[in-house]
Image (spheres, coloured by chain):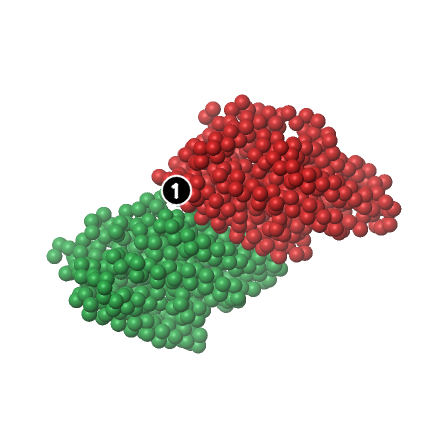
Chain colours: A green, B red
Amino acid sequence: MENLQLVLPEIFLSLSIMFLLIFGVFKKNSSRLVQSLSLAVLIVTAVITFNETIGINETKLFNNSIIIDYLSSLMKIITLLAAFLVLIISSNYLKTFKIFKIEYPILILSSVLGMMVMINSNDLIVFYMGLELQSLALYVLATFNRDQIKSSEAGLKYFVLSALSSGLLLYGCSLIYGFTGSTNFDVIASQLNSDVYALTFGIVFVLVGLAFKISAVPFHMWAPDVYEGSPTSVTLFFTMVPKIAALTVFIRFLYVPFLNLIDQWQTILVFLSIASMLFGAIAAIGQTNLKRLVAYSSIGHVGYALAGVAVGTNDGIQSSIIYITIYVLMNLGLFSCLLMLKRDNQYYEKIEDLSGLSKNHPMLAISLLIILFSLAGIPPLAGFFAKFYVFKAVIEQSMYFLAIVGLLSTVVAAFYYLRLIKIMYFDKEKEKYDIDHGFWLKFSLTTSTLLILIYFIFPGQLIEVVSRINII
Amino acid sequence: MNFPILSSLILLPSIGALFLFFTKGNKKNNFTIKYVALFTSAVNFFLSVYLWISFDPSTSDFQFVEERIWIDDFINYKVGVDGISILFILLTTFITPLCIISVNNSIKERLSEFLIAVLIMESFMIGVFCSLDLVIFYLFFEAGLIPMFLIIGIWGGARRVYSAFKFFLYTLLGSVLMLVAIITIYWLNGTTDVVELYNSGIDIKYQNLLWLAFFSSFAVKTPMWPVHTWLPDAHVEAPTAGSVLLAAILLKMAGYGFIRFSLGLFPAASEIFTPLIYTLSVIAIIFTSLIALMQEDMKKLIAYSSVAHMGYVTLGIFTIQQQGIEGSIIQMISHGLVSAALFLCVGVVYDRMHSRLINTYGGIVSIIPKYSILFMLFTLAALGLPGTSGFVGEFLILMGAFKDNFLVAVIASLGVIIGAAYMLWLYKRVVFGKLVNTDLKQMFDLNRSELFILSCLALPILFFGFYPDPLINTIEVSISDLIDQYNFKLASQI
């Protein structure tokens, strides 16, 4: 039983969720308190993860259905920190819409729990359980502003499509089980027989399900609508946190059981990656709503992260994790800016609302400028390095087509980022926005901008952190 | 020599920019802001002069080399100068303070932001010229897009948005292939260190594609025909100081890149693609000169003449002759000074009359004589009159070209005539002739700062026209060594 300490983070998180749920119900007007407690829980869980598991060699628990290694610990910590930051900067937004309730932090905690289970999973069933737990929480979060018809629509749409994809995923799992006789990743790996074509079908179905969760083209259709309809703070959560977990599962699922079938799935991933990069870049050009635009841009960025996964080397996996980490950082900054576009208790989310921001709010505008150039991947900002590592890994395997298409789509993508900059800097100013933002919002904007800006001074640090990930 | 002089050159303008960033940009502070910027860039200039004095021209090795680990086992931050790059650094640090002085008259709002952009631009440009690692080079090369995009977009003219976008996307599109090539080189040779790559050479199988990838980036930036179309737009819409930076320094990054990387790293491919470069250069020289003849807008005319001048530069580089490459570098330096001066001259009359159209002017010689004299000098330098630096460059290039390919040299020489035609015609229409437009009578002659800037530019143009020795001395050994290396690699097929 001594191994239980390795799953202590999960146990602690689930107990806390139950406690907070009961506490919130019995104590009236406790939303503030529950929020603070949830933040504390996230931090404590992260600390436990850091202390208990990050130094541990690969360990498998519960009939090998759960794996604790450096990758899972690292990704859990990133997830927890990202969730922490989302939660801490969303309170003002929620208060404005009068939906600052106890359910919000608790739902976020439960979806984080689901993601942690996903990240830990070494077994299809465990993985599916985690996935469903996080998805169920996300459906409710999408409809959190239930009086607004768009939010309800977003949630419903997300639910229906996501349930469909879960169905496909489960079907894929059953095919894999049928042809290998196990749901455990290690057993599957040993039972692999590449002559069995049905197994490839199984992989394809699972990949479809996963691609849906991280909104890779052509399974991205839900993303723009859901991102637009959901409350902005929830959109922020959507664009960052589930992708970290889904990417980890992507890596684990493809590289542990199916590494030997790399010829079969590599093409699929290359296609997903190229389609996402191109489509994300082209479709974003016509958008007028900032949240929709971010949705398309996140589709594009997922394409780059997948390009790293498609490579089939440790370098590729590491670059993809670097990419998603830097992407999370940039998105945090971007959404902090969006959450600052507030005037008379109303949030503005059209791109024209950025007009002339540089005159009225120079500091906000310069931060957004840095973040946007970084998203576009212009050196010397962090976004460039993210792309650089990915393409370095891609080119190592001589996948020039992927590299060139990817880089050309950055040029297309640069167009719409430049358009936002143009609106901010070259256009006439409008009315001013409020400036009484909460401390944490300012904090997250400043920190993310500064980190993006000075990343080039110590680019080695992040590589150091991920260089211990050795899956293959 | 332990003092990190090159890093200081790169960092100093940025530090100045940081200082400006924390200064409130209101009317009262404008004076302080400008002097801070001017002071920073002037210090940088003197530092680079010191660099030039202590530079040893008798060796082709890289000097003042600094190397620090940047990313473990991957990239080192490595900077250094040799005879080829040092002059460009000098040009950059010389032009920037003049740009900063010139904002007096042209930039009315958001002065501190403008100066921040200019200073950051200076940092990046110096970085381009002294980086000795491909990744670092790419970093600086691309980073320059950001400040330039903002300079054109925020302070530009009526069609500034279109021009800024065109400039940014064109150059970005050109450069991404270079990134692919750089990473490929890393995987082929295990390093991106330029010096090591010079020694080891690059596998001949890959050279052609790699050369083309670099070419796509440099050709856009040079700009060579037919991808030059962003330049006239960018020049016309950019504010005067922006045009000056663009013409004087930004365009030189590509010429420098051709010498340093295309010739240095891919000799076999350069040999194969020389006819391509010759063709494009000759077309650029003749075709854009003819276009320049037809321009109504002064800035556009000078922009097209820049394309033609850069045509000579690329022609000279790929002659692979001592004279040709020397001429190219001198032509780039001279063009940097002359085009900067011409854009400033246009800026001077534009600030007074708010028109860049040639037919607005005419007969201003009696109203603003000092201006007319200096403008005359720069016009003659642009068409390459003996006694100006323009002549030295063009003459050496043509000499190199005659050695290598007679036909190309003859056609290129014809370009000189057209060049003289459009420049002189421009001068005639603006300065001489009848004074038709009576509004011109209100124009006042050069004020002190304008006179200062233009004389600062006129001095080296004349000096190096009569006595180009200091320039040639600096670059001579490096170039002859480059050519030796080139021929050696070509002979031994690496």
Q: Is residue B12 left or right of residue A155?
A: right
Residue drawn at 25 percent across, 69 percent down: A198
The answer to whether residue B209 is visible is yes
Q: Position of residue A226 (x, y in %)?
A: 41, 70
Residue drawn at 55 percent across, 26 percent down: B477
Q: Quadrant of the C terminus of chain B?
A: top left
Q: In the image, what residue type sits under mark 1?
A: Leu
State which quadrant residue A77 falls in: bottom left
Q: Is residue B39 left or right of residue A309?
A: right
Q: Position of residue A115 (x, y in %)?
A: 29, 62
Residue drawn at 52 percent across, 63 percent down: A285
Q: Which residue is farthest left? A: A1
Residue drawn at 65 percent across, 34 percent down: B402
State which quadrant residue A120 falls in: bottom left
Q: Position of residue A79 (x, y in %)?
A: 32, 57
Q: Is residue A335 above or below residue A136?
A: above
Q: Is residue A276 left or right of residue B46?
A: left
Q: Position of residue A456 (x, y in %)?
A: 43, 44
Residue density around tag 1, few if under 14, some if 14–19, many if 20 or more, within 10 Å: some
Q: Is residue A72 above or below residue B375?
A: below
The answer to whether residue A458 is visible is no
SS type, badge 1: helix
State which quadrant residue A110 falls in: bottom left
**Which chain contains the residue that carries disc 1?**
B
Q: Is residue B208 above or below residue A246?
A: above
Question: Which residue is tagged 1?
Answer: B188
Q: Is residue B487 left or right of residue A426?
A: left
The count of marks equals: 1
Instruction: Pick the residue in front: B329 or B246.
Output: B329
